[in-house]
Image (spheres, rainbow, N blue to C red):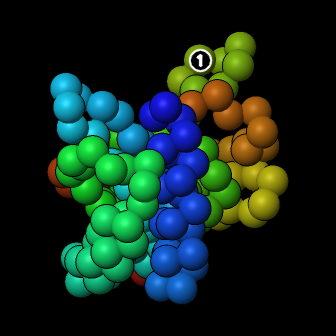
Amino acid sequence: MVKNNQSAVAAVVEPIATRLKLDVEDIEVRRIGTRQIVRIILDKDGGISMDEIAAATRQISDELDLLEELSAAFTLEVTSPGIDRPLTEERHWRRNIGRLVKVQIPDSGAIEGRILEVTELDVLLQVKQYKRSLPLADIERAVVQVEFNKPKESTDGH
């Protein structure tokens, strides 16, 4: 039943997100006791603002209130992706250019590097003193690393 609810919620959320020029990164519907939690993660290039999340929440809430599949009480959470969310799409990589990432690749373990460039097929990382290109299809898992003392950019832009 929750899977059907998730499809129904997606059918409501996708057109609203498209109209607001936002990407739907995830939709989760789960039951906790007699209530349902509807969690929607939205993002866009350049990051999503709190005002955009608030506008999306109002529109989504109004539409979900009319949805028969959610006739039981539900709690709506609309948020942006967290820092620990894995990079799974090319757009996730593109949105994090300049950030430090930890990448898991088959037979090589984990490497850590800064994202320099992203194409539809590859990512270029600065790994210590070397640049390394990785096919996105070969990456098992990648997560942005928290940096408290991000290095300053040099005068040549690197």
Q: Position of residue 7 (x, y in %)?
A: 57, 48
Nearest the camera: 117 or 41?
41
Nearest the camera: 30 or 116?
30
**In the rendered image of this protein, does residue 61 appear above or below residue 41?**
below
Q: Is residue 68 left or right of residue 82?
A: right
Find residue 43 and report its image quarter: bottom left
Within 10 Å of disc 1 (Cα), the crowding (few <14, some 14-19, many 20+) is few
Tell me the residue at 56%/68% (across/down).
14
**Which residue in the protein does label 1 denote?**
109
Nearest the camera: 23 or 98?
23
SS class, disc 1? strand
Q: Is residue 10 left or right of residue 122?
A: left
> In the rendered image, is residue 135 in sight?
yes
Nearest the camera: 137 or 50?
50
Find residue 99 and report its image quarter: bottom left
Q: Position of residue 144 (x, y in %)?
A: 41, 46
Tell me the residue at 19%/26% (across/down).
33
Tell me the residue at 49%/77% (across/down).
16
**In the rendered image of this protein, does residue 23 appear above or below residue 10?**
below
> In the rendered image, is residue 77 in sight?
no
Picture mark count: 1
Amino acid type, residue under disc 1 in the picture: Gly
Q: Position of residue 78 (x, y in %)?
A: 30, 61
Q: Position of residue 49 (x, y in %)?
A: 28, 78
Tell me the residue at 54%/24% (across/down).
110
Q: Is residue 12 left or right of residue 88?
A: left
